[in-house]
Image: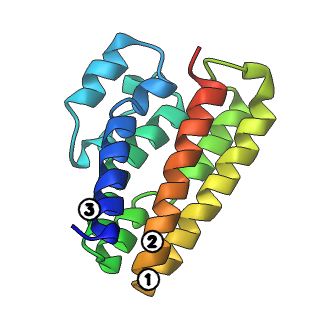
């Protein structure tokens, strides 16, 4: 197995492990965890506000979980079209979360007093998603891999800052 394939496999394994808990990172109930564990395809996009307690951040995390699976598969196959197509599903998610912040429906389990830091991290994260979309459009496998790894690191940091005890 060459170096690139080992890196992709390592990335895929890390993403799979991290993303299994991504919805639980900001959710507030066992119902969210159990519901998310059974949702593995298009269901993330079809969730109602009621199922997520009206927290658009939970909706964004569910969508991101599904998107990242497709991104990892696309990156592993050097398929920029697949990566770009997956990222299209995230359009509007950040804006909904920002509206939720403004209306008080976005809640953080840890460091709730640092909501402005969370908002800044979220903006930067979405900027990196846009960078990934541009790399995917060019089918730049090295850039897609690097950006996907960076995005995973940002996920973990955000969860540690705002979710994990």
Q: Disc 2 on helix, strand or loop?
A: helix
Which corner quadrant of the image does residue 113 belong to?
Answer: top right
CA distance separating discs 3 and 1: 15 Å
Q: Whole-percent x and y of residue 124?
A: 68, 55
Mark nearer the N terminus (3 vs 2): 3
Q: Looking at the image, which is closer to me, 35 or 81?
A: 81
Residue beneath disc 3 = 73
Is 77 left or right of 138, judged from the image as shown?
left
Q: Residue at x 53, y 36 (%)?
A: 56
Residue 101 visible in the shown view:
yes
Q: Residue at x 46, y 57 (%)?
A: 90
CA distance separating discs 2 and 1: 6 Å
Residue beneath disc 2 = 144
Q: Whole-percent x and y of residue 16?
A: 31, 42
User: Residue lying farthest bottom?
Assistant: 138
Residue beneath disc 1 = 140
Q: Residue at x 59, y 46 (%)?
A: 154
Q: Quadrant of the N terminus?
A: bottom left
Q: Disc 1 on helix, strand or loop?
A: loop
Q: Whole-percent x and y of residue 9?
A: 28, 56
């Amino acid at each position: 197995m060459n170096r690139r394939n080992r890196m992709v496999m390592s990335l895929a394994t890390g993403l799979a492990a991290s993303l299994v808990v991504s919805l639980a990172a900001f959710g507030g109930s066992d119902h969210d965890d159990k519901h998310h564990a059974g949702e593995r395809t298009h269901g993330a996009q079809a969730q109602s506000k009621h199922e997520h307690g009206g927290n658009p951040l939970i909706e964004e995390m569910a969508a991101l979980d599904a998107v990242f699976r497709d991104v990892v598969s696309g990156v592993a196959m050097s398929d920029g079209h697949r990566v770009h197509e997956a990222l299209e599903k995230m359009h509007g998610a950040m804006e909904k979360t920002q509206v939720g912040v403004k209306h008080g429906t976005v809640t953080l389990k840890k460091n709730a007093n640092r909501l402005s830091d969370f908002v800044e991290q979220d903006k930067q994260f979405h900027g990196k998603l846009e960078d990934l979309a541009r790399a995917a459009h060019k089918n730049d496998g090295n850039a897609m891999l690097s950006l996907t790894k960076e995005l995973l690191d940002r996920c973990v940091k955000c969860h540690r800052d705002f979710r994990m005890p």
